Image: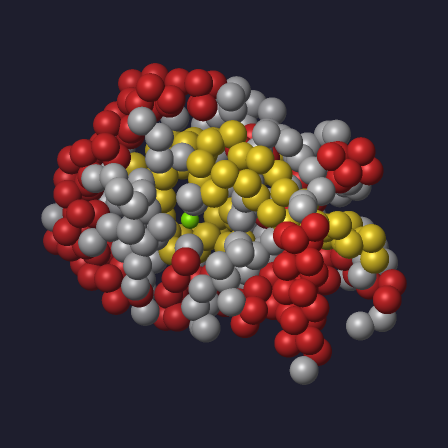
Amino acid sequence: MAQEQFTDVAVIALPLKTKFRGLRTRELVIFRGRERWAEFSPFVEYPDTEAKTWLQAALSWANEPLPKLERSAIRVNATLPAVGPEQVPQLLANFGRFGSVKIKVAEAGQDLAQDLVRIRCVREIYPEVKIRIDANGGYSVADAMRLAHALGDSELEYMEQPVATIGELVGLRGELSKAGLAIKIAADESIRKAEDPLLVAREGAADIAVLKVQPLGGIKRALEIAASSGLEIVVSSALESSIGLSQGLHLAGALPQLNYDCGLATAKLLVADVTDVPLMAHDGVMAIRELEPSAELVEKYRASGEREAWWKARLQRCLELLES
Ligand SMILES: [Mg+2]
């Protein structure tokens, strides 16, 4: 790897406003390439064989020319973690105006009744917004059907990864159709964690593909998957800093067609960012732009020496995997 593809490496630990994905702090690496700053931020539990694809995405963003944009701004959803109803008003007020909200459900240690309380609480405060849920594969087919029956099909824009496997997704779609419930299914983990991201489409397991640019290896690869899948597309973030989000925004901007709000307004979930002008939504819309980190913020949120050593070793191992 030529040195100029990869300079000014900094390991950052950004605090989160509320626990998300079981995390209170989001650790990530930023570095400067020939063209722009990039972020490498696979979640810490991911093995190197998975994390290396995230590095491939970061390296291509940092060093390659970008595809042509079809639009200059992206409509985005608000995101609500799996909190109790008492936290819902404040967390959502934080997003300002928005047309759709993704509600996290099926959190470990919680039950379906708590999910329904959270969803109904959102509906009461925001009668007009579109609601999509994300279970991260945490429901059984039976639970997903219970939720679908309890809410009815006019209430949900779609269910994101309600169940874990492609087989269960296919099964759930069959059950929904038998019950006469027209609820769309979006696949997330079944695409980004699969050896073959197109299997979901071939098996008829989803209506919508949630594409995340880092786990898919970069914008070019994600655009190829979008085209080959024939599915409708939602671009989502992986809880990145604004540096990582700018890459996701570019993917959303480069897609030939975009029918849904994207899940890129996640900088709101962070207490701090690496830039003074974070990529935030204004009235549910995000402008596409590139950005540079603030030296002051990088210093302020630099990870501990121990975490820095861990990330640099991981980066090195992933680099070797990519080069071998
Ligand atoms: Mg998801």
Using the image as rendered, state which of residue 175 and residue 279 is in the foreground. 279
- From the viewer's side, name the closer residue of 103 and 24: 24
Residue 168 location, x and y as percent? 24, 62
Left or right placement of residue 280 versus residue 24 in this view: right
In the picture as drawn, the residue positioned furthest to the front comes out as 306
Image vertical order of residue 289 relative to residue 86, above or below: below
Q: Position of residue 1 (x, y in %)?
A: 80, 72
Q: Is residue 256 visible?
A: no
Q: Residue at x 45, y 39 (%)?
A: 20
Question: Is 231 situated left or right of 264 in this image?
Answer: left
The residue at 51%/21% (across/down) is: 94
> What sort of colour scheme is used for the picture?
secondary structure
Tally of numbered tags: 0
Q: Is residue 141 left or right of residue 74?
A: left
Which residue lies at the image location 28% right of the left edge and 55% below the top edge?
163
The C terminus, quarter of image: bottom right
Above-or-below relation of 128 to 222: above
Please say if 312 is above or below 324: above
